[in-house]
Image: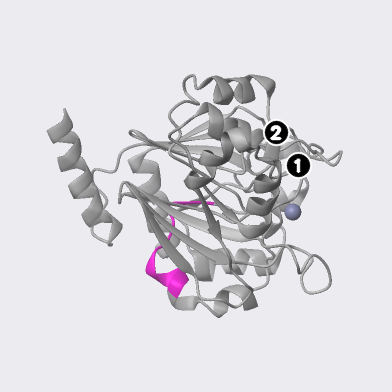
Amino acid sequence: MRKWLSLLSLCAVVNTFGQSPALIPTVSVNYVANAGLMVTQEDMKVLFDPLFRNSYGHYELPPKAIKAALFANTPPWDGIDAVFISHYHGDHFSPEDILRLLVAQPGVHLYAPSQAVTGLQAITGIENKSILKRVTTVELAYGDEPVTLDLEGLLIEAVRIPHSGWPTTRNEVENIAWRVTLNQTTTVLHMGDADPNDVHFARDAEYWDIRQPHVAFPPYWFFNSRFGLEVLSKRVKPGHSIGVHVPKSIADDPLKRPHDLRGYDLFTEPGEIRKISPKQRSKAELKAER
Ligand SMILES: [Zn+2]
């Protein structure tokens, strides 16, 4: 079985670099809430913005059952390899809950912008100081070159994209778009609360060209803005996109949504799961190439 899996991975590596899509394993995406989700491929599990406490009256909160499973290290929320935080806002990051997760799951590595890490350090008592060894701070100013990090089985790339509201508000928020490749096979992109202006993406055109995500998770406002759609189609070029950060007021039923959000795949129900099969992905990839 192990041998078969390595052969599978080997074929899939070839695929990552642009050859025919053949043996890519199915990827599961478990939606937590707001911009929180888990991507699983084979034995690799990563989380993005999974734990937060503030809905600001508009967004879903992580279901109690998911939080409980994360803290109890029970399937399918067990054995998490890495957690990525886009930025320190109350609807994306709770230092208290992330500390609890780091204590509960000793295999977790955390990657976060410095504002979030400072928040975590401030509440970490002496008894838990050792967990900070599993925390990697990404300090990126707007305009800095993207950075690349490695963790066993993960290629991690990060770039700062301003928070929505740019250039008039929230410029100080360190918002990181994480592009993560699992087992050298599947690349996903989580964008946090990215502003959809192409000026942020054009400056790193080569970076976006070099590795196109199989699945991207843009905030839903990329879908109802002409600029956001252009960034997705001309820069990011994902095989498939699933919109996140969807307000509770947007219906699960696409026909009941505002017209400009009907044609897109959105996460709206906490706990829902998408399986992205090799066939679906290769179809999406072909569509993206057109
Ligand atoms: Zn935010």
Looking at the rendered image, the quarter that the N terminus falls into is top left
Residue behind label 2 places its C-beta within 8 angstroms of ligand 1: no
Occupied quadrant, residue 139: bottom right
Mark 1 element type: loop
Question: Please, what is the three-letter code of the amino acid marked with disc 1?
Answer: Arg
The answer to whether 266 appears left or right of 155 in the picture is right
Location of residue 189 in the rendering, given as x and y in whole percent from the top left corner = 51, 54
Location of residue 90 in the rendering, given as x and y in whole percent from the top left corner = 77, 45
Between 31 and 220, the residue placed more toward the observer is: 31
Look at 19% across and 48% down and name the residue there: 11
Look at 54% across and 19% down and name the residue there: 72
Looking at the rendered image, the quarter that the C terminus falls into is bottom left
Mark 2–mark 1 CB contact (< 8 Å): yes
In this picture, which residue range is highlighted in magenta? 207-216
The residue tagged 2 is: 253
Q: Which dot marks residue 224?
A: none
